[in-house]
Amino acid sequence: MRMSRVLAMIFVAAPLAACQGANAGKPIPPVRHVDLARYMGSWYVIASIPTHFERNEFNPVETYTLQTDGSICTSFRFREGAFDGPLKKIHSMATTLPGTGNAEWRVHLFWVMRAQYIVAWLAPDYSAVIVARDARDYAWLMARTPHVSTAEYALMLARLKAMGYGLAKVRKSPQSWPEAGADPSSFGDSCR
């Protein structure tokens, strides 16, 4: 990578990181608008501050499918403990909150739990996203590809820190593709 590009990335990331202290504890603003049709499909989890269920994930992929009633079927799949570990799937439904431009959701887990889902940063070309929560307890850095460049990853971390997150609990997700026997077109199959 050219030195000028590295310096440019540092100049972009430094002000973002400087905002971290000022943002801690405040609500995380969602992006202005999410085009749900463009947002649907599979996202590879590049890194996360994981929930209890995700702490030992390999090849994690989150897939969203828009339903005819406007709700969103979410299918999270991963290998437990190793690239050849048992396949695990978690399915849930989400609804967008009115007045948020489709950028804030409520995810309904196990019929009783509801979780906040904020699209806190979204690449203009919908190639990468940061999903956050006001509690700053969990976060997901995702992309349309299993890997992003080192510089892109550093910028995503800087953005997360600028939102008031500490980075000590961020876990980079192990991704190795193609996965034997995996059909990416079936990742959202729980919605069919």
Image (spheres, grey):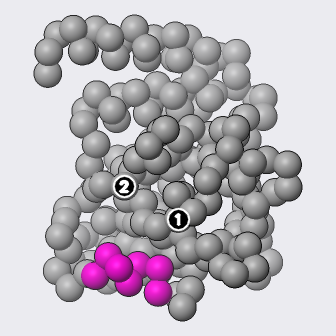
The percent position of residue 92, horizontal first and vertical second, equals 63, 77
Q: Name the residue under label 1.
A: 40
The kind of residue tagged 2 is Arg
The kind of residue tagged 1 is Met
Q: Which residue is drawn at 46% across and 47% down?
A: 126
Q: Quadrant of residue 112?
A: bottom right
| Magenta-colored stretch includes residue 22 | no
Q: In which quarter of the image is the C terminus?
A: bottom right
Q: Mark 2 points at which residue?
A: 144
Q: Is residue 131 above or below residue 113?
A: above
Q: In which quarter of the image is residue 91?
A: bottom right
Q: Check disc 2: other Cα within 10 Å, few if <14, some if 14-19, many if 20+.
A: some
The percent position of residue 181, horizontal first and vertical second, equals 20, 85
Q: Element at badge 2?
A: loop
Camera-side residue: 188 or 92? 188
Compare marks 1 and 2 and give the one earlier in the sequence: 1
Discs 1, 2 touching: Cβ within 8 Å: no
- Direction right: furthest residue: 98
Camera-side residue: 26 or 100? 100
The percent position of residue 51, horizontal first and vertical second, equals 56, 59
Q: Relative to 37, is 60 on the left or the right?
A: left
Q: In which quarter of the image is residue 6?
A: top left
Q: Residue at x 24, y 15 (%)?
A: 5
Number of marks present in the image shown? 2
**Observer able to see residue 21:** yes
Look at the image and give the residue range highlighted in magenta: 183-189
Q: In which quarter of the image is the N terminus?
A: top left
| Magenta-colored stretch includes residue 185 | yes
Q: Residue at x 51, y 17 (%)?
A: 17
Camera-side residue: 92 or 98? 98
The percent position of residue 186, horizontal first and vertical second, equals 38, 84
